[in-house]
Image (tube, grey):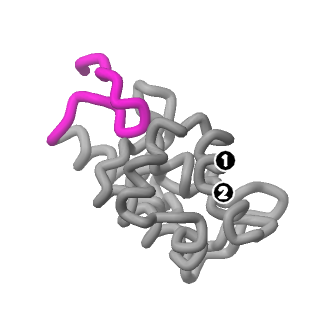
Amino acid sequence: ELQSFMDSLDLSHHTAALENEEMYLDVMAMLGSEELSACLKELNLPMGARLKIVKARPAIVGDTEAEPTAGQPSAVGNSSSEFMCPITMEMMRDPVVCADGHTYERSAIEAWLREHSTSPVTNLPLPRQ
């Protein structure tokens, strides 16, 4: 099951890391999106891989839409993951578009850029500004 799921996300090269830590689909299904993201980060999966897995979480648990963040209404007709910051995995309140074309929570991307010169999603270098 895990192999098929990872293959469907084009992340099969990360399957062994998940299996080594016994992070199978049933475990992922028990975790909320934020908790799952934190666990995947502890396993040193790259930001892009973590984001794909967390976005696919509804398929794991059989939800028809992504779970809303506490205190936030879910987006009607859209996946609420569109409004989630890929760094914080929380609904964005002050979204900004970065040079990589991705949208982030302003405070999160500012903090990221103080420590890194790469995109948090693609890990590619960002142009200097």
Disc on res. 1:
2
Q: For the residues marked 2 and 1, what is the alpha-carbon distance in whole angstroms?
A: 5 Å
- Pick the front one: 19 or 44: 19
Along the horizontal axis of the image, is 116 left or right of 72? left
The three-letter code of the residue at mark 2 reads Glu
In magenta stretch: residue 110 = no
Residue 73 picture location, percent across and down = 67, 75
Residue 87 picture location, percent across and down = 39, 52
Alpha-carbon neighbours of circle 2 within 10 Å: few (<14), some, or many (≥20)?
few
Along the horizontal axis of the image, is 12 left or right of 19? right
| Residue underneath mark 1 | 4
In magenta stretch: residue 122 = yes
Image quadrant occupied by the C terminus: top left
Image quadrant occupied by the N terminus: bottom right
Please name the residue shown 47% across and 53% down the image: 85
Furthest toward the top, the residue is: 127
The three-letter code of the residue at mark 1 reads Ser
